[in-house]
Amino acid sequence: MNKIVFFLVILFPLCSYPLYWIQEDWSGGDGQDVWADSTRYLSGSDVNGWRGKGCLFLNAPDVHNWHKTGDLGGIAHKTYCLLERSGGSIIYAGTACLDEIGRIFKSTDHGENWEVDSILYYPPNAIYSLLETPDGSIFAGGNTNIYKYDSIDTIWKRNYSRNYPIWDFVSCKGYLYAGGGNYVYILEEANWVPRPVDMTQLFSIESYDDEYVYAGGLRTNKFARLLRSSNRFISYDTTASLDTARTVYDIVETEEGNLLASTGNPGGVFSSSDGGTSWSFTYFTDFDEVRTLIQTDDGKIYAGTYPNATIFKSEDGGDTWESVFSFSDTYWIYDFLQLGNGLLLASTSASGTVWRSGYFTEGYLISSFYPTDTLNGSAEYFKMTVNVELNSGEIVVRVRTLSDLNDTLPKWEDCPPCSCGDGENQFNISSMSSITDGEGWIQYRMDLKSGNPANSPWIEKITIKYSCDFEGPRIESAVASDGVNGEAGIDGDDYITIVFDEPTDTSHIESSNINSILHLSSNHTWLDGFGFIRNAKWLSPESLKIELSVNGTLPTVEIGDTIFPDSVTIKDTLPVGNGSYKPFVIIGSFGPTHITEMNNLTHKNISLFQIYPNPFNSFTVIRYLR
């Protein structure tokens, strides 16, 4: 009796998935491990762009060119400190004035022009330090007082009074610290708590590793040391001695976690990579003091000196220094400030003049090499979307691919330029001469132009859409066939044909490896009693014919078995192939062509009752007989 078998076969098409490289924080991003400098979003010594949080822009400081900003009312004598409010709308300058009254000046145009914001009496004849806390409060340190800006009444109010100048502030682990005289002051529950320290005059305090607070200054008749505390100076210890130096003026923790201390008598910079247990020293010849330090967003460190107000730069974390600019008509550089747009300000002693670094009217930025998610040669590139604000400037984008990081790159000038307009820009990169499908690395370059230091063009987001083939060949069918003998069950000329949904690499398959490459369910085997198949041959890159052998005992492979490819041997034809791994059930028959076998059917017999349609029955019932 004929046996009827029903199959539902669902075929999944081969897919290349759409993928995206999106960058919008510019603090690093995917692929940065292959940059020449893994901490920067720049490439090359002449790259003038700047990497900021939330954007890329042009105004990196040109530290070889500085100019004086506007006059500070004609009354300022020295400008000791600078502060940019969150959002960059206001810059404050704390000064000492000729009438011995402390004034805070403000600028709303990136330091180009200044006006008096507040006059602080009680009487501070100088403002030495400024700090904005995370909650938006602003504190100012004067000769004998700490002031706090009241944002509701928009006035400065005296917050604390003491008999020592307040030279510095720092915030660490939710506490605000102030330093002056031989005290460190800690703001605890709205009250300033003084803690005495072994210091004649404290000039600088700095948090380190968000765990310790370091304090430095003048220790009369003693070599300088830094004081270190992790418990709000309830107790503290000291670092190793900064031999030969008498005064510490500024402390900086670098991005690399090193500690730098600028000193006077002699002037130089001490560096420690172990938190102050040991120090190395760089002496600044002909300079009595290194008064201030700053590490800018591009990792460079700048030092301001006395006398002759010269700026030095280090590009190796403070190990070596070079002179980049000397100010005229002044002796001291008291403070540095880097603005949100990348420019540097320097406060000085010459009529309180604030100097501003030059800016670049044009420059470029180069991204990392980004690896598409598989480097198997299947990458296909489609579209690039760039979101910009031109601010009356210009932005041109170029993009290129390569297959290996050691390959010779297409020259940027040979890459087609994509000029951006304001807002969102979309470019079809699939047909560009610098883009080659199958190459697994992609990189882009932004060229920017601007004539306004306050309004550089901004790159807010870039998205590159591409696809990759992650899937290996899928078995599309696995059909058992009877040979010419026409005998029921497996005989000596039966075979199974496996068809894949895409070309394969036609991996070699034989008796010794077929059970591991194409594993069968239920511990069944392709092999006869002597451990052989007759043959396994590729009819085409998509089609594999397995001819069975019947020497000794028969192979146990049967209809309904599931084939499990090993996922590594049979692959597609990509340079780095994806392996076949999707299982598939064998169908067909090893018997004559009019018989279709299914050995695991629960019911072997069927009987057909009535005939449909007929005038008397509207339906037919198929019943299984046990």
Image: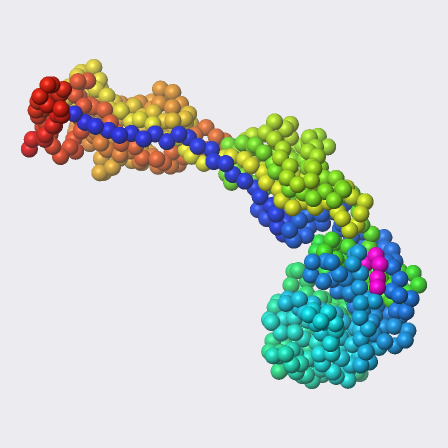
Please say whether residue 133 is one of the residues in the magenta stretch. Answer: no
Q: Main SS type for the magenta part?
A: loop
Q: Is residue 85 shown to the viewer in this render?
A: yes
Quadrant showing the C terminus: top left
User: Where on the picture, by quarter, is residue 80?
Assistant: bottom right
Tell me if 35 is positioned left or right of 484 in this view.
right
Tell me if 236 is positioned left or right of 564 in this view.
right
Residue 489 location (% of width, % of height): 16, 24
In front: 135, or 261?
135
Relative to 65, is 501 above or below? above
What's the residue at 66%, 41% (across, down)?
A: 423
Tell me if 61 is positioned left or right of 511 in this view.
right
Residue 321 location (% of width, % of height): 79, 59
Quadrant showing the N terminus: top left
User: Where on the picture, by quarter, is residue 537?
Assistant: top left
Relative to 65, is 86 above or below? below
In front: 300, or 538?
300
Tell me if 350 is positioned left or right of 120 in this view.
right
User: Where on the picture, by quarter, is residue 522?
Assistant: top left
Q: Which residues are magenta?
A: 111-115
Q: Residue furthest right?
A: 329
In front: 532, or 448?
448
Q: Residue furthest left?
A: 626
